[in-house]
Amino acid sequence: MSTLTHSDSVVVSVPPEALYALVSDVTRTGEWSPVCRACWWEEGRPGEVGSWFRGRNETPERTWETRSEVVAATPGREFSFVVGGSLVRWAYTFEPVDGGTRLTESWEFLPGGIALFHERYGDDAQRQIEDRTRAALEGIPATLAAIKRIAES
């Protein structure tokens, strides 16, 4: 598996600003993420560029926490954060379309994350990277479907 980026989109029947308000409230992430169970703000003004939040993630195999920095916060246009400050970038973009908003979720495994995995996992790094990549590929459509359901209800 060589693709370390992925994105997918869904049209949601709400205006971009309203959808942005929902998605950028990281304290609600546990409502739609298949892996992240909870998030909370730790540092800075919630939702602004430079603020940090922590997330608790769970799979059947393990539970772990991450710390992420908001790197883009333009209401109605983009909300993005980088896990660990340099490991993985998650982005949500909001495009007005007839009947609502095209919400795109993007994921990119950054060079810092790849280097960390090689340092941490050694000979098992590639398998670990592939596992995380597969989780993102499978999780993005599930996340988008759940956000759509919540936003439109």
Image: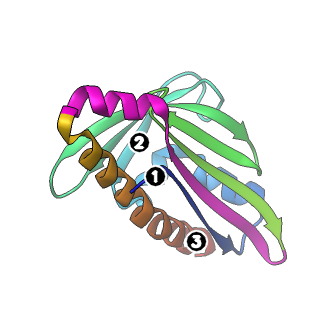
Which residue occupies 36% across, 35% down?
Answer: 66
Task: Determine which of the numbered discs, if any, sits on residue 135 in the image.
Answer: none
The magenta region covers 98-122
Mark 2 element type: strand
Which residue occupies 65% across, 31% down?
Answer: 48
Residue 76 belongs to magenta span:
no
Is residue 47 toward the left or the right of residue 29 in the image? right
Spatial distance from mark 3 to mark 2, Cα to Cα? Answer: 20 Å
Is residue 53 toward the left or the right of residue 64 in the image? right
What amino acid type should be assigned to the residue bearing mark 3? Lys
Asked where in the image residue 15 lies, by quadrant, the reply is bottom right
Residue holding disc 3: 148
Question: Relative to residue 84, is residue 61 depicted above or below?
Answer: below
Which residue occupies 39% across, 53% down?
Answer: 133
Spatial distance from mark 3 to mark 1, Cα to Cα? Answer: 13 Å
Residue holding disc 1: 29
Q: How far from the left and from the top, in percent, is residue 127?
A: 25, 49
What amino acid type should be assigned to the residue bearing mark 2? Cys
Comes first in the chain, label 3 or label 2? 2
Mark 3 element type: helix
What's the colour scheme?
Answer: rainbow
The quarter in which the N terminus is drawn is bottom left
